[in-house]
Amino acid sequence: MRLWSLHPKYLDAKGLVALWREALLARKVLENKTRGYKHHPQLARFYASGDPLKFINLFLHEVYTEACLRGYTFDKTKVDIPPQPQSGFIAEFITVTDGQLQYEFGFLQHKLLKRDIKKYNENRALTADIAVNPVFKVVPGGIADWEKVKAMPDIYEDV
C-alpha cells in the first residue's frame, strides 16, 4: 500500500489507478471493515490525525478530482466525498516533512523511469516546489519514521 503525499498529478495512469484502489482499501481499514492492514505504516499519519475517515475521504477526493481531469471514470459512490472541499483548499492538514516528500518524489521517479518515460520526463522538468495532496502541509524534516526506505540509484541520468 502506498498513499502518496505527492499530488496525484505526478502519477502515471497505472499509479493513479493503484492509488485510488489502495486509498479505498485504506478507507475500509480505517472503518474497521477488514482485518488486514490495520497496522500498516502508511496509515499511521491518518490514525494520528484525530479524524482518519475525514482525512482519507479528503485524500480520495483529490485523487478522484485528478482522475476526472484526465477523463477517467472512477466511481465516486465508493467513498463519502465531502461536499465542501475544492481542489487545493482544505482548512485542516496532516503534516508531511519535506524530506518525506523528496523521498517519495525520487521513489516515484524511479518507478516511472521503468514504466512511463514520458511522465518521468514531465516530472523531471519541475522547477518549482513539489505539490502535495492538499490534505498535507509540508513542514521541515527528514524521511518519516513510518517509511520503509528502499535504496535507489541516482535516477536523474540522461534519458
Image: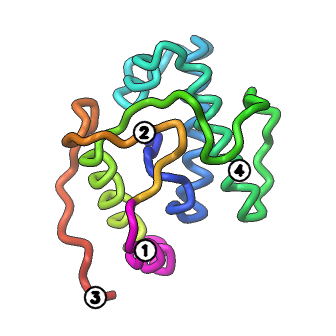
Of circles 2 and 3, which is in front? 2
Rendered location of residue 52, percent (x, y): 53, 19
Name the residue type under label 3: Asp
First of labels 3, 1 by sequence position: 1
Rendered location of residue 83, percent (x, y): 79, 31
First of labels 1, 4 by sequence position: 4
Give the magenta part as a residue range. 115-129
Name the residue type under label 4: Thr
**SS at mark 3 in the image:** loop
Residue 71's quadrant in the figure?
A: bottom right
Q: Which residue is mark 1?
A: 120
Contact between labelled residues 2 and 1, with CB atoms less than 8 Å apart: no
Name the residue type under label 1: Tyr
- Nearest the eye: 64 or 32: 64
Q: Distance between the Cα atoms at labels 2 and 3?
A: 32 Å
Contact between labelled residues 4 and 1, with CB atoms less than 8 Å apart: no
